[in-house]
């Protein structure tokens, strides 16, 4: 009976995988300790050929003190965007928050030597602004998750609700326009609150100007000012002839005849 129980339990223990499956919610575990992570897809032939070697390498994980994991990009699009996976399979080495891309041979022996001989030290780590924990990669992860959510909604509209494909595209187009309108209004409101426009004020009234200058400024075009007594119109003053001088004889005062008689 004991032999039969051991025989039945043996294949189950042997068939248990030592590879951990990572999800988008648990990716921060990669920031602690040493990891080897494979990004794969079930439909990828190269990924299918790698699986036996990766499983054999995972059996040495406890001896090498390294965690061996895998990520299905079809189920975890957020991690695919966070690590910018452009080819499959892709393998990353993670050590205390530093990420390096493995580009060597894909055999169990090569994986073991890569960890035991610390060959990963010869590879330049990913820069901090391109690291999975950076703001840029977090935005990429959100974008990939949004695209997957849109895909699921499109499948729900076409398969479950029976809406044609063009109808589903129209719904997404209207949602996009409405979202852009709302976002634009919010941005304008915030800009007006943070940087209000300055209103121009009229210049102060010139109190120190003379009354004559104020009168000239208030004079309407085409309006004539009535001349005062004794004023000569300007046009007449220009064309008025100067007075004719009197002859010298008339200018001399005549001497009365009585005075001449006294002299004589």
Image (cartoon, helix red, strand yellow):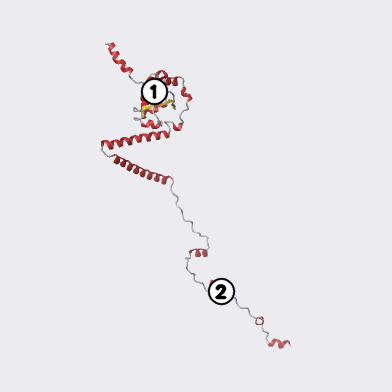
| Mark 1 element type | strand
Residue at 30% across / 15% down in the picture?
Answer: 9
Q: Quadrant of residue 85?
A: top left
Q: Which residue is mark 1?
A: 68
Residue at 28% across / 37% down in the picture?
Answer: 158
Mark 1 touching mark 2, by CB under 8 A?
no
Q: Is residue 260 above or below residue 165?
A: below
Residue 168 location in percent, x, y?
Answer: 30, 40
Residue 231 appears in view: no
Horizontal side of 79 relative to 260 (left or right) equals: left
Horizontal side of 168 relative to 61 (left or right) equals: left
Per the rendering, the mark at residue 159 is: none
| Mark 2 element type | helix
Mark 1 Cα-neighbour bin, 10 Å: few <14, some 14–19, many ≥20: many
Q: Which residue is mark 2?
A: 239
Residue at 72% across / 87% down in the picture?
Answer: 262
Q: Nearer the viewer, residue 244 or 34?
A: 34
Quadrant the C terminus occupies: bottom right
Residue 26 location in percent, x, y?
Answer: 37, 28
Horizontal side of 86 relative to 10 (left or right) equals: right
Residue 253 location in percent, x, y?
Answer: 66, 82
């Amino acid at each position: 009976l004991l032999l039969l129980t051991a025989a039945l339990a043996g294949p189950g223990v042997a068939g248990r995988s030592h590879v951990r499956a990572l999800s988008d919610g648990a990716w921060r575990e990669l920031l602690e300790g040493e990891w080897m992570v494979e990004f794969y897809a079930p439909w990828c032939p190269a990924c299918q050929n790698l699986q036996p070697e990766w499983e054999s390498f995972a059996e040495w994980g406890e001896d090498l003190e390294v965690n061996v994991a895998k990520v299905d990009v079809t189920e975890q699009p957020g991690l695919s965007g966070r690590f910018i996976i452009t080819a499959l399979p892709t393998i990353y080495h993670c050590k205390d928050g530093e990420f390096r891309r493995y580009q060597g041979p894909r055999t169990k022996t090569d994986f073991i030597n890569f960890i035991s001989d610390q060959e990963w030290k010869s590879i330049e780590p990913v820069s901090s602004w391109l690291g999975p924990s950076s703001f840029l990669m977090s935005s990429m992860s959100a974008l990939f998750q949004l695209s997957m959510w849109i895909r699921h909604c499109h499948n729900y509209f076409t398969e479950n609700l029976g809406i044609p494909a063009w109808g589903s595209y129209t719904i997404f187009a209207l949602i996009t326009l409405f979202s852009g309108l709302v976002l634009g209004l919010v941005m304008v409101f915030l800009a007006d609150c943070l940087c209000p426009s300055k209103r121009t004020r009229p210049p102060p009234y010139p109190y120190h100007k003379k009354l004559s200058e104020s009168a000239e400024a208030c004079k309407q075009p085409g309006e004539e000012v009535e001349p005062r007594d004794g004023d000569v119109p300007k046009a007449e003053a220009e064309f008025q002839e100067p007075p004719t001088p009197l002859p010298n004889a008339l200018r001399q005062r005549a001497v009365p005849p009585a005075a001449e008689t006294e002299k004589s």
